Image (cartoon, rainbow, N blue to C red):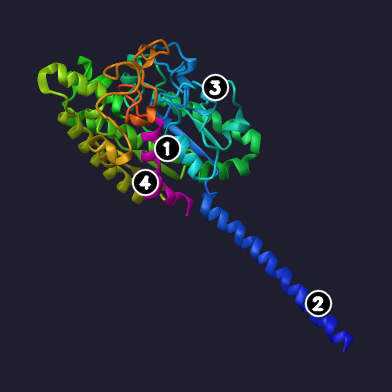
Amino acid sequence: MHICSHSFLSILHSQFLEMGVFIVAAIFFMQIYITGAKVPAVIVFGDSSVDAGNNNQLQTVLKSNFRPYGRDFFGGKATGRFSNGRVPPDFISESYGLRPYVPAYLDPAYNISDFATGVCFASAGTGYDNATSDVLSVIPLWREVEYYKDYQSKLRAHLGVEKANTVISEAVYLISMGTNDFLENYYSLPNRKSQYNVTQYQNFLANIAEWLIKDLYALGARKISLGGLPPMGCLPLERTTSFFAGNGDTCKDEYNKVALVFNEKLNGLVERLNDELSGAKIVFSNPYAIFQQIVRKPSTFGFETAAVACCATGFFEMGYMCDQYNPFTCSDASKFVFWDSFHPTEKTNRIISQHLFKTVLSKFSS
């Protein structure tokens, strides 16, 4: 009897151990599912919509590493992000269960151990077109890719080849640019407009986007998000221009139509490349519709206005024109859709990022 009860207890103990192992394993896999731990890093290419401060290290007028920029960021620090707080990659990184911010590659405060879980190569003022980056002497797209190659070498030295290659293939790559190609370049300077009509220029840019995705794929990237354009005719700067042209306080429909057509081209590109590139998972992250909803009915999202920005007068200022000495800057940025005349507030960035994560980007963690 004693032997039987002892055997029974041993079996029971063994079952409890197995159950414990099962529960621990279940919790672990549940955490992976909930936090998106299958994504080890977020890697960013693009312009000021996603720049985390790379322009701080450049000789360019396009900077934002001074107050009131960053006043709502962690510690109230002006990092070089073109907002009062965080930009989309920061929220997306957090949604994957990673850090709540993605550091800039050129920021000397960070090193490869920081970049192993996320890194930003973006540069405010750049675009797909090299001529766009020349306008304000910022980092061209090809240079962002060169920095990424340099990062890969450092990552392999830091983690070892096998682990680094896993990070490279499992990381999510965010691409966000194109607005500057049209507003800063095509519609502002004569060169590209004399070479291309707008449809030809859209195709020219889409071809560069294709080159970028294929280049990243050849370097090991497999999870790629290609970002679309926002309704760029509704930026406060463009509304101000429209007003002074005698068209009233309205969005520039021409620019919005260009954005819509370009987004269709990018979406078609994504569909085609998913068929062409074996093992790749490419998505089109389109902010246009949600951004348009926010601009048209700001009160629905808890905003007071989308026509003017928080910083300075809100009509045309950004960068150095939006400094801490300007007496017109608003006290509560959460009431505004736009932070400066070109860039959204942290609250807008959060809403758009959460929408894109829920509808598109969460697929990468499944």
Q: Which residue is mark 4?
A: 283
Question: In the rendered image, which quarter is residue 263 located in?
Answer: top left
Is residue 279 visible in the rendered image? The answer is no
Question: What label sits on residue 174 in the rendered view?
Answer: 1
Q: Which quadrant is the N terminus positioned in?
A: bottom right
Looking at the image, residue 197 sits to the left or right of residue 322; the answer is left
The front one of 197 and 317 is 317
Task: For marks 3 and 4, give the one nearer the viewer.
Answer: 3
Q: Nearer the viewer, residue 299 or 50?
A: 299
First along the sequence among labels 3 and 2:
2
The correct choice, above or below, for 30 with respect to 192 in the image is below
The crowding category of the residue bearing disc 2, from other C-alpha atoms within 10 Å (few below 14, some 14 to 19, many at least 20), is: few
Callout 4: few (<14), some (14-19), or many (20+) C-alpha neighbours within 10 Å? many
Query: What is the distance, in whole Å, between disc 3 and disc 4 at their CAs?
Result: 29 Å
Mark sitting earlier along the chain (4/1): 1
Q: Quadrant of residue 327?
A: top left
- Kindly state the secondary structure of the residue where label 3 is placed: loop
Q: Would you say 296 lies left or right of 91 here?
A: left
Q: Marks 2 and 4: CB-CB under 8 Å?
A: no
Q: Residues within 10 Å of mark 1 (few under 14, many from 20)?
A: many
Question: Predominant secondary structure in magenta?
Answer: helix
**Residue ID for mark 2:** 10
Mark-to-mark CA distance, 4 and 1: 10 Å
Q: Amino acid at mark 1?
A: Leu
Going from N to C along the chain, the mark reached first, 3 or 1, is: 3
Label of residue 107 in the image:
3
Residue 71, given in percent of the width and then of the height, sits at 47, 23
Mark nearer the viewer, 2 or 1: 2
